[in-house]
Amino acid sequence: MRNLVAFGIAVVMAVATMTFGAPSALAGDTECRGTLGPVTIVGTLIVPDDATCILSGTQVQGTIVVKSRANLDATNVTATGGLQGESPASVVISNSSFGNSISLRKAEDVNNPAAGKIDISGTYINGDVQLEDNREPISLRGNEIVGSVQANKNVGGVEITGNLIGNGLQCQDDTPAPVGSGNIAKQFQRQCPSPQFGTTAA
């Protein structure tokens, strides 16, 4: 009888451990539908087609990928890799940190055009920011970007204000022409000239 009781206690403890004591790290490719808080993702974090992902205090040991018509809202996120978006509906990032480049192309919210946007603010990016062929309004404000910023062929409007850019700021074939000020960069090119967009770093 004592053996049966001991076995039963062991089973209960094992189940309790699986239910309540599971580690907060999620390994491998992880799909995000809904909200993730302060957990650690090990691998690629994917926002699938048509999904909405809200990240708050999440740590990603890898890259974030935003798929077609998907929405990402990320606050206080730390990612060792970069961010890639191909035809997303909306990407909003604030007070976060990325260990590699951000590349967003062909953003368009076909279901709710008034809701779609690209808004990156207060974020550290250890790489480049590439914005190309987007139809949504773009706002790049108060970021520290180690590499370059390129905004090409965007048609939803582009604002680039108050960023510290390690290399160059280049805007080309954007309609309407970008607006902005207060940036610091090594060089300003084409539609984003100095002194209108900022001053050249010493």
Image: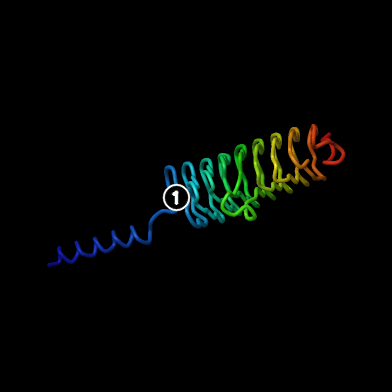
User: Whole-percent x and y of residue 130?
Assistant: 66, 36
| Residue type, mark 1 in image | Ala
* Residue that extends furthest to the left in the rendered view of this protein: 1
Q: Is residue 174 left or right of residue 7?
A: right
74 or 107: nearer the viewer: 107
Question: Looking at the image, which residue is at 56% across and 51% down?
Answer: 71
Q: Quadrant of residue 106?
A: top right
Residue that mark 1 sits on: 25
Which quarter shows the C terminus? top right
Q: Quadrant of residue 2?
A: bottom left
Is 151 drawn above or below residue 22 in the view shown?
A: above
CA neighbours of label 1 inside 10 A, class few (<14), some (14 to 19), many (20+): some
Q: How is the image coloured?
A: rainbow
Q: Is residue 62 left or right of residue 176?
A: left
Which quarter shows the N terminus? bottom left
Q: Quadrant of residue 83?
A: top right
User: Whole-percent x and y of residue 64?
Assistant: 53, 43
Question: Looking at the image, which residue is at 58% across and 50% down?
Answer: 77
198 or 202: nearer the viewer: 198
Question: Looking at the image, which residue is at 33% across and 57% down?
Answer: 18
- Identify the secondary structure beneath mark 1: strand
User: Whole-percent x and y of residue 170?
Assistant: 75, 34
| Total labels drawn | 1
Q: Is residue 95 left or right of residue 27?
A: right
User: Whole-percent x and y of residue 179?
Assistant: 79, 44
Question: Looking at the image, which residue is at 15% across and 64% down?
Answer: 4
* Residue that extends furthest to the right in the rendered view of this protein: 195
